[in-house]
Image (spheres, helix red, strand yellow):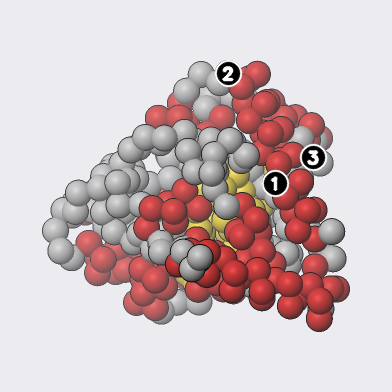
Amino acid sequence: MKKQNFELKNDQIRAAFEDLKRKSPERLAQRLNLSWSNWGFGMESLADSAARLERAGIRYIELHGNHYGPDLGYRVEETLRVLGDHGIAVAGVCGMYSPDSELASNRAVHRQAALDYLKREIPFTAAVGGSYLLVIPGAVGRPTAYDDTEFERSVETIRLVADLFTEHGVRGAVEPIRSAEVSLLHTVADAKRWIEAIDHPGIQHINGDVYHMQVEEEHIGMAILEAGERLVNLHMADSNRRALGLGSMDLDTIIMALYVIGFNRPGCYVTPEPLGPGGNPYPAMYGKPDKAALDEMVMQTARYFREREEALLA
């Protein structure tokens, strides 16, 4: 029986992975860096979150970019002390962009709010040792476009702070998000077009998210290959946006594609972010945490990811 189109693409990725495994086994010696995005833990102390990740054997964290004002957000010394107590290092920071603070807004006050936010978040990311800051040109939770110049307006706005990325040694990583949540930039190809339009060394990278990719891309594994060396972080969740192993996501093909592009190098991270289904996930950041449920979600995800990784590399 003739294989389905996605199966043929799976086979291409598996063939490339097996070829790498056979010819260059040394390139598979280093395992993928497993991180976790903590903003989905809601109103929980950083100490509790770090302790959970330590118990699960996760050594990196993507911090909630919570510097919404001069008096708000994590403090550098306290953050490093808390994470250090649990052997956790900062992978990067998840920038947050709402209709009140977005680069593509048709209201100048909201674009200025986004610029002020980035002026706080970029130095913080560098100070805590994060290597990337997630950037989204439009607001999450606003899927309807204001007008047909959002792309150009977001490019013009981000250029005003682009130098800060290079000055602080932080990689700007744009995240394509499904069209049910944002009005622009839905695919890896869209992200590359935005990066090229900005044309600045500080914003050259991509933050992927498999949950969005399964909706917007033709094939997740192929999209990973298309992103290539621009990809610095990959948000993970199963097909139902729950813990890995609780849905139908083809995790094996994703892992193989990551090894094919050399994603097991330093500075690249696989970062689970199982937020559950819905149009706007941002309310989760203010939710009351169910610690037992969060413990199980993190343990299940870490265990399943490493099981599949080892099964492929054995």
Between discs 1 and 3, the one toward the N terminus? 3
Report whether residue 205 is seen.
no
The picture quadrant where one finds residue 141 is top left
**Quadrant placement of the C terminus:** bottom right
Looking at numbered disc 3 in the image, what kind of residue is underneath it?
Answer: Gly
Q: Residue at x 26, y 54 (%)?
A: 183
Residue 39, compared with residue 25, is above or below; it is above
Mark 2, other Cα within 10 Å: few <14 / some 14–19 / many ≥20: few
Q: CA distance from mark 3 to mark 2?
A: 20 Å
Looking at numbered disc 1 in the image, what kind of residue is underneath it?
Answer: Phe
Front residue (pair 6, 137): 6
Between discs 1 and 2, the one toward the N terminus? 2
- Kindly state the secondary structure of the residue where label 3 is placed: loop
- Kindly state the secondary structure of the residue where label 2 is placed: loop
Looking at numbered disc 2 in the image, what kind of residue is underneath it?
Answer: Asp
Residue 119, position in %: x, y?
46, 55
Q: Which residue is mark 1?
A: 305
Q: Which residue is mark 3?
A: 57
Q: CA distance from mark 1 to mark 2?
A: 22 Å
The picture quadrant where one finds residue 17 is bottom right
- Kindly state the secondary structure of the residue where label 1 is placed: helix
The picture quadrant where one finds residue 259 is bottom right
Residue 203, position in %: x, y?
48, 69
Residue 227, compared with residue 283, is above or below; it is below
Q: Residue at x 57, y 52 (%)?
A: 250
- Is 120 on the left-hand or right-hand side of 131? left
Residue 151, position in %: x, y?
26, 66
Q: Which residue is mark 2?
A: 290
